Image (cartoon, rainbow, N blue to C red):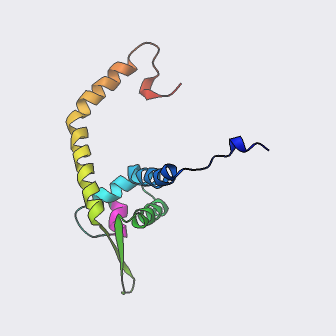
Amino acid sequence: MSQGNIAVPTAAQDEACPINEVLDHIGGKWSIGIIVAAAAGPIRFTELERAIEGISRRMLTLNLRKLERDGLLVRTVYPTVPPKVEYRLTPIARELGDSFATLTAWAERHRHAIAAARRKYDGQPGRPAGGQNL
């Protein structure tokens, strides 16, 4: 068997993998919603569930675990019956939340121009409507 086809990760690739993984986590629509919802302060699971339209309990749980693992959320369980669980952003997540606020403001300022560009693009002959891939 040829050894030429065996990929050996370099140190740079090892470092890049976690970066890509973290970017995938924070770039997902559910993660963004969680971070935005938790920006005002500690928030409970059910409050998150109500704040993030369309998210299932399972998806919320998975995303909360990922964000906690990445050091973006702190989960606090209070010894009550039933148990009270709160989530709060860590300092690095608050910094990320500021970036999301900037991005959201940009999207709000330019939403009309983007909508107009989409209408123009979709109206061109030979272009699939709605940005569909061929």
Residue 66 lies, in percent from the top left, at 44, 62
Residue 54 lies, in percent from the top left, at 41, 53
Any magenta on residue 3? no
Q: Is residue 38 visible?
A: no
Give whichever of 39, 81 is nearer the camera.
Answer: 39
**What is the count of numbered marks?**
0
Q: Please report the bounds of the magenta region as a residue range.
A: 44-50
Give whichever of 18, 74 is nearer the camera.
Answer: 18
Q: Is residue 122 visible?
A: yes
Residue 116 lies, in percent from the top left, at 28, 24
Q: What kind of secondary structure does the magenta stretch mostly adopt?
A: helix
In the image, what residue occupies the spot 47% across and 63% down?
A: 62
Give whichever of 91, 124 is nearer the camera.
Answer: 91
Give whichever of 74, 112 is nearer the camera.
Answer: 74
What residue occupies the far top of the structure in this picture?
125
Quarter occupied by the N terminus: top right
Residue 89 lies, in percent from the top left, at 29, 65
Q: Vertically, is 47 above or below 96?
A: below
Q: Vertically, is 37 above or below 12?
A: below
In the image, what residue occupies the spot 32% across and 66% down?
A: 47
Q: Quadrant of residue 87?
A: bottom left
Q: Quadrant of residue 61?
A: bottom left
Left or right: residue 110 versus residue 55 is: left
In the image, what residue occupies the spot 37% across and 20% down?
A: 121
